Amino acid sequence: MGAFASILELNQGKNMSHQIPPEDAPGPTRPARLNPALQESLKRYWRTNLKIMMVLLAVWAIAGLGCGVLFADALNAYSLGGYPLGFWFAQQGSIIVFVLLILIYSLLLNRLDARHHAEMESLKQGDGEEQP
């Protein structure tokens, strides 16, 4: 308890308010203010990213839950490799669709990241100052 007691002694009676950063200072909880064009670019990036994720999650839900469980009886009228299609989707199809969706997501996000990077570079050159 010696180290803890010495810390308490050092801080006793001292005004610690000088260590609190001012309201407008950037920090881990308050990021630096960004210019409006940069903020709009970041919002557009995340909106597009969320749209891509929502569409791909909907496809996954339809393939995994819809084809494997809800529509299995209707799909069982058809067969794939000698197995009923509903059974095939429940066992393997939804996993294959999931892996394909991961590939599609990575390709779409690579394209989105390249477009976003080009936009950030043009904003940097247009402002004449470096942005994070």
Image: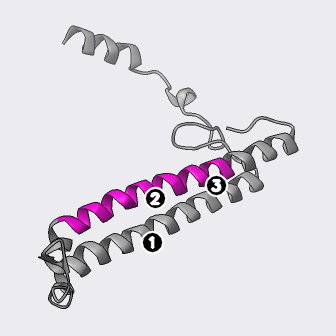
Q: Which quadrant is the C terminus positioned in?
A: top right
**What percent of the width, then of the height, locates residue 75?**
21, 86
Q: Position of residue 38 (x, y in %)?
A: 72, 51
Q: Which residue is mark 2?
A: 104
User: Which one is in front in this view, the residue at disc 2 or the one at disc 1?
Assistant: 2
Q: CA distance from mark 2 to mark 1?
A: 11 Å
Residue farthest to the front, as pictured? 82
Task: Please name the residue that numbered disc 1 is placed on.
Answer: 55
Q: Is residue 37 above or below residue 5?
A: below
- Residue in the picture at 14% in, 89% down: 73
Q: Which residue is mark 3?
A: 42
Q: Residues within 10 Å of mark 2 (few under 14, many from 20)?
A: some
Q: Are marks 2 and 1 in contact (CB under 8 Å)?
A: no
Residue 87 highlighted magenta (yes or no): no
Dot 3 alpha-carbon crowd within 10 angstroms: few under 14, some 14 to 19, many 20 or more: some
Residue 2, x across and y down, in percent: 22, 8
The quadrant where residue 124 appears: top right
- Location of residue 65 with respect to 92 vertically, above or below: below
For the record, the magenta segment spans 92-116
Q: Residues within 10 Å of mark 1 (few under 14, many from 20)?
A: few
Kindly report the distance in space between the C-alpha atoms of the residues bearing marks 3 and 1: 20 Å
Tag 2 secondary structure: helix
Mark in front: 3 vs 1? 1
| Magenta stretch: helix, strand or loop mostly | helix
Residue 95 among magenta residues: yes
Q: What's the distance in space between the residues labelled 2 and 3, CA to CA?
A: 22 Å
Residue occupying the point 82% across, 36% down? 129
> Which of the 4 quarters of the picture holds residue 96?
bottom left
